[in-house]
Amino acid sequence: MPASPSPGLLDRRLLFVTGKGGVGKSTIAAALAMLAADHGKRVLLVEVDAKGNLTDLFERPPVGFKPEVVAPGVSAMTMHTEASLQEYLKLNLRVPVIGRIGPIARMLDFVASAAPGVRELLTVGKVCWEVRESIAGRADWDLVVVDAAATGHIISQLDAPRSIRELVQVGMVREQTEWMADLLADPEITALNIVATPEEMPVSETIQLVDQARTELHVPLGAVIVNRVLPELFTRADEATYNALREPEPARILEAGVGAGSTAVLDAARLAVNLRRTRATHLTRLRAEVDLPMLYLPYLFVRGHGVRVTRMMATALGEELGL
Amino acid sequence: MSPKRRGDVDTDAPTFESLLATKEIVIFCGSGGVGKTSVAAASAVAAAVHLGGKVLVLTIDPAKRLADSLGLEGIGNLEKRVPDEVLKAVGLEPRGELWAAMLDTKQSWDELVLRHAPDEETAYRILENRLYANLTARFVQSHDYIAMERLYELHESGAYDLIIIDTPPTRNALDFLDAPARMAEFFGGRLLRWLTLPYRVGGRRGARVLNVASRPFYQMADRILGSQFLQDIAEFFLNFQSMYDGFVTRAHAVERLLHDRRTSFAVVTTLEMAPLREAEFFCEQLVDRKFDLGALVLNKTLPRYLLDDDGARAATAMCDAATDVAAPLARSGVAGLEDEARDARVLRTIGESFRNFAVVAKREGELRTEIRNAPDIVVDVPSFDADIHDIAGLVELGNALLRRPTAPDQGRA
């Protein structure tokens, strides 16, 4: 077994949550926020990949750039780079007339779509700013949880302050990148967490991202959160018994006892065992190649979604973290 | 070129098979993790095997084992034929040819620049520009655009009867649709001309003219970004603009191809809430924007027997009366069943497991009945209990898409 779960995870100030699409990244980010709030923290949850459905996980209507309370102790906001830029310009340029921001914002927006990193910088910049303000006592967040870009884009997102610094030699943008990079690199403050499911691509992308993060990125890694882990149905001896049940004579006895549906139940068990087995090989690979703390969350056999699922995940996370 | 018809197709009702048989391009889209790449590759295998013709699958980011099984390891942008022997080895007699290629974003961009630059010197000035390297590697939309551009190029070559492509993993899986138009707009935009103005006037590239540069707008831009960066950007775009005409003409051609009736889209999703909502949105968007929405693929669905009432009753009996059911089993004399307590435990376990999976299957069933904006062709693909990572797996998946049985000597044992 690799390192033990990291108890200090919730004691940091800024948690990024990434992962391949479809692994449950947003749910985990929401559950982390809920768990931290359960422990008395005031949490800001930031949705970066603006799909606008993060608040579904709290059964609340969508939120905008301005944080709104979505659960006790949890406020949420959706990232808008334009809004972030406007805010930045107002704070830093002290442009007196709002009207003048328009053309400059358009120009910068244009540069943002052309020059790599500018858009990402506006995203990460806003997040870092909230953290810095909180540390300085000017904002209320004990913890900022970011439902960040997926594994394919997270490096360019988090590396934006550094890559911009390489491109921009002077000017205000460059000055701003320094403190951001410092904040992102501080292991007391920041952790990048990766969500994976025990499947081939999510595991491969996690391994790759951990490697890349260590070589290219100056952001400390937190935990790998393994989502949708299927339960082990049988011990070896129990499985032998299960196999015996499939033989003709026992199958007949079973059908006589429980009815014609016995075949479906036996088939479903086979499916469960095979799914678990396939996933186990990926899990083994993940454990062998990644030496980060791992948190395991069960596959939830539940109907529906929403706040109830978020709550279940928060509880499971709390157990894994020993809280 | 008129639409071709390959293979024997029942023309009465549209099927996924008829879609593959009549279109020249099928673009697979869907949110991350739904199995887009596997479904696209399986469709290509199925088309090549059952419908014939020369079929190419252009894949963006395949899992390593899948790429290996198609022989895609380290071949860059080159298209490669999957040898017939590979298909014969899994019991198939292909009617057509299966080709595969992977998208190399950087290489594709370089080729594009070399093609459109007015002269070699300009081409190399662009290729060596710092911004260019960053732009092609990281600029998110550049991925989308180059995938469509490459698709256009392959189609234009006329070498293939059917091209199947899976779309890049993007923040919004439909971004690629706008990519050609946005590219054209970007390079033709007024703002770009404005931004590069100080560097264009005065006859010589890079020569700054004071009276333009001293305008408040440029002063402000200078203050924020620094003049060196602005100059880098301007120089890059000035060079890039020399390719403008070729580039924009091409972007429009790519856009036309995507709208052509020979091109169709297949949206892939699982029956989970979030991917399905996104799939519905894609379907709606595709129709609104007058693209041809060909099919909706419901991937990795749980087997129907989990919805079986008899199954539910049997599972309940196994959970609630495990000991009663176990007693005759323990007496049967079959090896492995002697221990009545263990039999009862196993019965409870499998009964419970059935009920667990049945909950998920029911949820899937409910989601299936309320799908909005679905096209005529909706295909269910069962969840295979092992990964799709080899030709045999693709064959099985392809057969499910085409609703053809997998012969005992085909696919996996």
Image (cartoon, coloured by chain):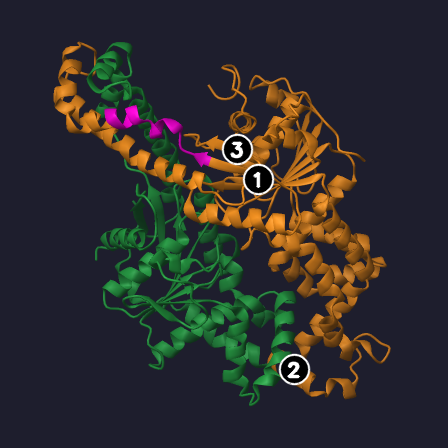
The reply to whether the C-beta atoms of the residues labelled 2 and 1 are less than 8 Å apart is: no
Colour assigned to chain A in the rendering is: green
Q: Tell which chain the image draws in orange.
A: B
- Check disc 1 and report the residue beneath it: B375
Residue B386 pos. (x, y %) = 43, 30
N-terminal-most mark, 2 or 3: 2
Amino acid on which disc 3 is placed: Val
What span is in magenta? B300-314
Q: Is residue B35 above or below residue B179?
A: above
The kind of residue tagged 2 is Asp
Image spot of residue A263 (x, y percent): 31, 20
Magenta stretch holds residue B307: yes
The residue that disc 3 covers is B379
Residue occupying image coordinates x 50% and y 78%: A87
Label 1: element kind = loop
Report if residue A16 lies within the magenta region: no
Q: Quadrant of residue B369?
A: top left
**Earlier-in-chain disc, 2 versus 1:** 2
Quarter that holds the C terminus of chain A: bottom left
Establish whether labels 2 and 1 are both on one chain.
yes
Q: Which of marks 1 and 3 is in front?
A: 1
Type of amino acid under label 1: Pro
Q: Distance between the residues labelled 1 and 3?
A: 10 Å
Q: How far apart are marks 2 and 3 (CA)?
A: 56 Å
Q: Residues within 10 Å of mark 2 (few under 14, many from 20)?
A: many
Q: How crowded is mark 3: few (under 14 residues within 10 Å), some or many (20 or more)?
A: some
Mark closer to the observer (2, 1): 1
Most foreground residue, B303 or B244: B303
Residue B222 - label: 2
Please give the name of the residue rendered at 36% of the width and 26% of the height, measured from the top-left corner: B305
Residue A217 point in image, percent of width and height? 48, 61
